[in-house]
Image: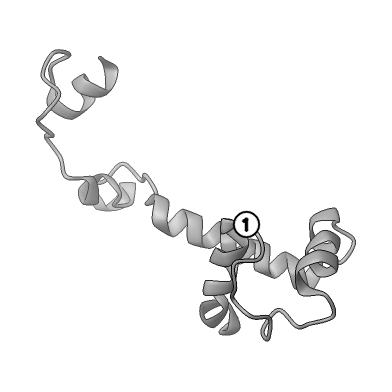
Amino acid sequence: MCSAFLWSGSPTQTHKAKVSWADVCYPKEEGGLGVRRLRDTSKVYALRLIWRLFTQSTSLWVCWIKHYLLRQNSFWDVRDDSQGSWMWRKLLKLRDLAYEF
């Protein structure tokens, strides 16, 4: 009921939105609500995990990744096959973007 009221102004009407999602995601200074887009936020957190591979060698996650998934290979050179979780495959797909940093 709360979400229906937020999007339509009525707790019983669920199919009508008063504001587009793109407008909601604008910063507050530009008239939006400052809600972050999930796709952008997910990409930022994935890039943060890649950053951890290179900066936090004492992390348990980093040690596990290096031992079981990288196996003496470089993150930049490892093949993108079905090994690892969906998140690992997503990290491998972001290599081109991460390489810029």
Extreme residue in the right direction: 58
Q: Is residue 6 above or below residue 89?
A: above
Viewer-closest of 47 and 31: 47
Left or right of 94 in this view: 2: left
Q: Position of residue 53 (x, y in %)?
A: 75, 69
Q: Position of residue 84 (x, y in %)?
A: 66, 61
Left or right of 79 in this view: 3: left
The N terminus - image quarter = top left
Q: Is residue 80 above or below residue 3?
A: below
Mark 1 residue element = loop
Q: Which of the 4 image quarters holds residue 72?
A: bottom right
Q: Residue at x 42, y 59 (%)?
A: 40
Viewer-closest of 26 and 96: 96
Q: Residues within 10 Å of mark 1 (few under 14, many from 20)?
A: few
Q: Which of the 4 image quarters holds residue 62?
A: bottom right
Q: Which residue is mark 1?
A: 85
The C terminus - image quarter = bottom right
Figure label count: 1
Q: Residue at x 90, y 61 (%)?
A: 58
Mark 1: amino acid: Ser
Q: Position of residue 73 (x, y in %)?
A: 78, 82
Which scheme is used to colour this image of the protein? one colour
Extreme residue in the front direction: 82
Q: Residue at x 15, y 23 (%)?
A: 14
Viewer-closest of 41 and 29: 41
Q: Residue at x 56, y 57 (%)?
A: 86
Q: Position of residue 51 (x, y in %)?
A: 69, 69
